[in-house]
Every structure is written in C-alpha cells, then in structure tokens.
Image: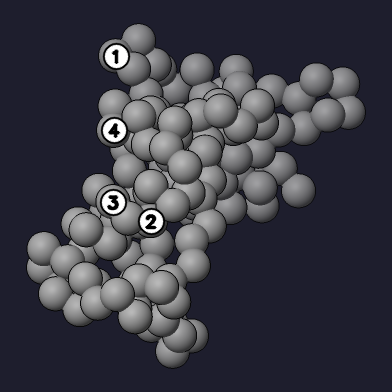
Amino acid sequence: FIVLNVGRHKHEPLLAAFYAGDIAMRMERCSDDEIKQRVLTALARFWPGAADPALQASVEVLVTRWASDPYALGSYSYPTPATTESSYEELAKPVGRLFFAGEHCNPINPGLVHGAVETGEATA
C-alpha cells in the first residue's frame, strides 16, 4: 500500500493510493466505498486526522480496477527470469504500418513512465 501526495504540485488536497500484488486483486472485488474506508483506516494509523468524520464525509474517491480492465489486464510489464533484451525488441516490432511503443518495449526502463516516453519518441 503506497500513498502519494500528488496534490502538493497543484496545492490541492489530493492523494493517490496504490495497492499491488494479491491485496490489489482482492481490492478489485471491493466497492468504491469499502476501498475508501480501508484507505482512510490505514491513513488514520499514522495521521489521526483521517479518522475525523467530517473529513471522511468530504472525501471523494476514483477507483481504477486495472486487472479487470480489458485494455490493461494488470498494471505494467515486469521482466521474468526468461526475459531478454530481444523480448522487448520483439514487442516493439511494427506490424505493417502499425507501430508499438510503451514501457513494455523498453529494455532499459521497463515498467516506467519515462520508458514509455523514450520509446514513444523513438517510434515517432
């Protein structure tokens, strides 16, 4: 469970919470309200203000469910022991006039946004 204060860049109260692994798969089956309560309960362990009922009532959530999204089917690529540099090259091969770019095509920065940007710029 990771929480990022992404609102600090815009000076707005905005947090992003990320679950990974088995817990992320279980969280996909929870309602948005259940996830909101679980996140606020976890936050209250190190920030007691998160337990304030007035604050909790004002919190809005946007929940993504990447594992059940047919276009994502998870979150990002990750190498297995069998992955080689040619694995990334194979994923990046064009099919006719259709070109591919993304973090999954970058052998140096797989799974990272800047890996996606690098391959996008190279493909363009």
The secondary element bearing badge 3 is classed as helix
Task: Give the alpha-carbon distance from disc 2 to disc 1, as whole Å.
Answer: 36 Å
Image coordinates for residue 58, horizontal then vertical, percent: 44, 77
The answer to whether 46 appears left or right of 26 in the picture is left
CB atoms at circles 2 and 3 under 8 Å apart? yes
Q: Amino acid at mark 4?
A: Ile
Q: Which residue, given by chain and number where applicable, does mark 2 sit on?
A: 36
Q: CA distance from mark 4 to mark 3?
A: 12 Å
Q: Is residue 33 above or below residue 65?
A: below
Name the foreground residue: 4 vs 81.
4
SS class, disc 1: loop
Q: Which residue lies under the disc numbered 1?
A: 81
Q: Is residue 10 left or right of residue 45?
A: right
Q: Which mark is residue 23?
A: 4
Q: Nearer the viewer, mark 4 or mark 3?
A: 3
Q: Residues within 10 Å of mark 4 (few under 14, many from 20)?
A: few
Q: Earlier in the sequence, mark 1 or mark 3?
A: 3
Image point (32%, 65%), residue name: 4
Amino acid carrying label 2: it is Lys
Q: CA distance from mark 4 to mark 1?
A: 24 Å
Residue on which the image places disc 3 = 38
